[in-house]
Image: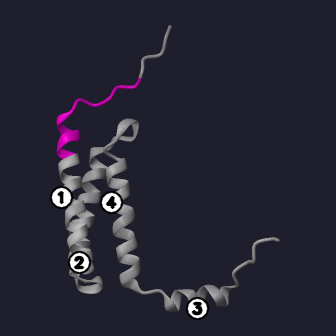
Amino acid sequence: MGEQEVTPEQLAEQLRRLKVSDLVVSTCATVAQLGFAKLAGESRDLEQAQVAIETLNALVPVVERAAGEEIARDFRQVVANLQLAYADAAAAPAEEPPEAES
């Protein structure tokens, strides 16, 4: 059985039903995941992790108004954990790629 294609009308209806608050919460979760990923291993990018922290700090008050204090509190904890992980990563020496053998 093949996948059913979504028509433009169906897509428009889905967008009409989508709540901005749900999208903001989902965006925060995605930004947090990316922020932590940017602090690990070969993909380490402190600048991008800092952007994630700043973005979450900007969005948490919106989450609080739109989705409630409990969810906002969870994201505040995520921000705190991300800031701690950032501090640890910034203090640690950068991993250097393995040297190519001659």
- Residue type of the residue flagged with mark 1: Ala
**Which residue corresponds to the image point at 67% horizontal and 86% vertical from the top-left?**
8
Q: Is 23 rendered above or below residue 48?
A: below
Q: Residue at x 25, y 83 (%)?
A: 68
Report how far apart the C-alphas of labels 2 and 4 lie in the structure.
17 Å
Write the residue at 61% across / 85% down: 11
What SS does tag 2 mark? helix
**Rendered position, 16 above or below 37:** below
**Dot 3: within a 10 Å radius of its alpha carbon, few (fewer than 14), some, or many (20 or more) residues?**
few
| Mark 3 residue type | Glu
Which percent across, then down, holds residue 22? 39, 80
Residue range of the region highlighted in magenta in the rendering = 86-97
Q: Measure how far apart labels 2 and 3 are at the Cα level.
A: 30 Å
Find residue 13 and name its label.
3
Q: Which mark is residue 80?
A: 1
Give the CA distance from mark 4 to mark 3.
29 Å
Q: How is the image coloured?
A: one colour
Name the residue beneath numbered marker 4: 32
Q: Secondary structure at mark 3?
A: helix
Q: Nearer the viewer, mark 2 or mark 4?
A: 2
- What amino acid type is highlighted by mark number 4? Ala
Q: Which mark is residue 70?
A: 2
Where residue 29 appears, as percent x and y from the top left, is 36, 66
Q: Residue at x 26, y 66 (%)?
A: 56
